[in-house]
Image: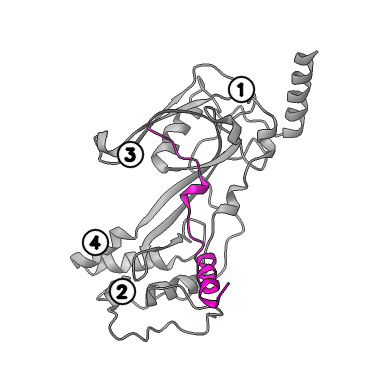
Amino acid sequence: MDAERAAAILAEIRSKKFTRKEFWSPVKGPNTIRILPSWTLDLSQDFFRKTAQHWKLGNNQDLWVTCLAEEGYERCPVCERIDSLYRTKNKDDEAFAKLIRKQTKVLYNIVDMNNVSKGVQVWQSGITVLGDIVKFVGNAKYGDISHPTTGRNIDIVMTEAKESKTGWNDYAVQPDPERSAIAELEWLEQMTDLDSLVKTKSVEEIEYILANGELPPEGYTPEAKPVSTDTQKSPERYGEPKETKKPAEEVKAKPEARKEEVFPKSPTQEKDVNALLAKLRKDRADKVK
């Protein structure tokens, strides 16, 4: 491996580049899946992980960062930049602000019931799909669709952009009318820690990206102020507003707990997952006898 190849690999690692191939994606038409409960195995916890990202950053608009405000930090430099851009009342600034605004994403552990041999996979949806799912969870007629014993399979019906009214891929949620237990207990042991998939950069790293249009160099420290040496680069290219406001005093502390979710929890959720698993195993053994 030569130095150039090593540098390329290092850059990819440092960018924490998002790869869709790691996630399950629905195909056109109905996709029957089973959404699994919380990866913590505490059934009182949410079965999803909500986060948000800012895209289209950098010289080539090929960088993205997790929104720190969404993760509960005191500051998100991109959100601050967006506010500043809107305040200029400049059309170009407003257009760039819309381009880099946060996009909410939701992660789930799921099993594709049409391809169970792949085991547990991670699915990423938009916030609208999550809203459709939790509407059913909050309906006593359906209850917690992620429950291992009394949940339901659901169909995610995908309509491709070229056929949808919105011009984007559309997704409809249709729960199975019948409750059912998960087919394999091992699925609960294969779940991914969804928190581990949410990668954040520091305030200083994000500020560097906004100022220079590229990732900070290796060994970059907060004390070293990001300054672009390329005189041909225009500040507006990286979202620098034509009228700027002195940034507020930086607060680096991260809260101890995430913000409270706005989505309802099912009143039927159980907390003692060990007892539940013991019951599931006993029921399975009794059926074999």
Q: Looking at the figure, which quarter contains the N terminus?
A: bottom right
Looking at the image, tell me whether mark 4 or mark 1 is earlier in sequence order: 4
**Residue 240 - label:** 2
Res 146 quadrant in image: top right
Element class at badge 1: loop
Check if mark 4's residue and mark 1's residue have beta carbons within 8 Å. Answer: no
Q: Which residue, given by chain and number where applicable, does mark 1 sit on?
A: 150
Left or right placement of residue 219 versus residue 133 in this view? right
Asked if residue 268 is positioned above or below residue 80 in the image, the reply reads above
User: Who comes first in sequence, dot 3 or dot 4?
Assistant: 4
Q: Are marks 3 and 4 in contact (CB under 8 Å)?
A: no
Q: Mark 1 or mark 3, which is nearer the start of the sequence?
A: 1
Amino acid at dot 2: Glu
Q: Nearer the viewer, mark 2 or mark 3?
A: 3
Which residue does the numbered mark 3 point to in the structure image? 169
Instruction: Give coordinates of residue 141: x percent, y percent.
Output: 50, 19
Q: Is residue 138 visible?
A: no
Q: Few, some or many C-alpha atoms within 10 Å of disc 1 (few <14, some 14-19, many ≥20)?
A: some
